[in-house]
Image (cartoon, rainbow, N blue to C red):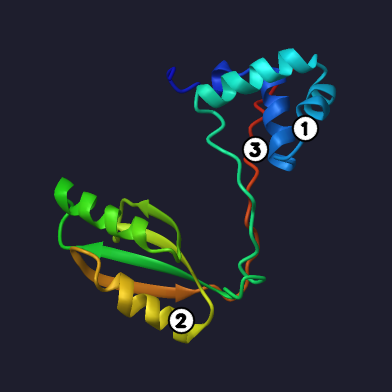
Amino acid sequence: MSKETRSSELDRIDIAILEALQKDGRMSNAALADKVGLSQSACSRRLDNLEKSGVIKGYHARLSNAALDHRMTAIVHISLSGQFEKSLSEFEAAVRRCPNVLSCHLMSGEYDYILRVAARDLADYERIHKEWLTGMPHVIRINSSFALREVIDRTALGIRPDMA
């Protein structure tokens, strides 16, 4: 696999392809080619290059947490007993196994990690807390906050640099 492409290496056609796919990841190659002004074969080659270079990491269906009865989002701050490589690795391996953790970020500042956790309700979050979070290795402190309302949840990244 080739090295990861940097955004500064993308031309206007690559950016147009990425913007179109962020809006509709199921777009056919023919529709994509038409949208960006390429032949189907040229579009297919560019798409293949964007995938191989790591710019496109995958294609996913965006599911509704509410429709799947996960109506609560918790933002969880985690402190570990230390930031030794072994501690971080063991914690990260454990957090990857928890199906309710939607995202996890190693942080600078007061807490070591911030997690976004989906739960059906407060009782379900309590279960996740007891069965998963408190049992993760090296955890010494957990601080949970609950989202009252989702204001924005972007899936599309603003990628168009200032182009003249």
Q: Is residue 41 left or right of residue 73?
A: right
Q: Which residue is mark 2?
A: 124
Which three-letter amino acid code belongs to the residue tagged 2? Asp
Q: Which element carries disc 1, helix, strand or loop?
A: loop
Q: Is residue 66 left or right of residue 124?
A: right
Residue drawn at (57%, 31%), measured in percent from left and top? 56
Q: Is residue 84 visible?
A: no
Q: Which residue is mark 1?
A: 28
Location of the C terminus (image quadrant): top right
Which three-letter amino acid code belongs to the residue tagged 1? Ser
Discs 1/2, front: 1
Distance CA(mark 3)–CA(mark 2): 35 Å
Viewer-nearest residue: 143 or 17: 17
Q: Which x, y percent locates residue 65?
A: 61, 67
Q: Which residue is mark 3?
A: 158
Q: Which mark is residue 7?
A: none
Residue drawn at (29%, 60%), measured in percent from left and top? 110
Discs 3/2, front: 2
Which three-letter amino acid code belongs to the residue tagged 3? Gly
* Residue 37 image-quadrant placement: top right
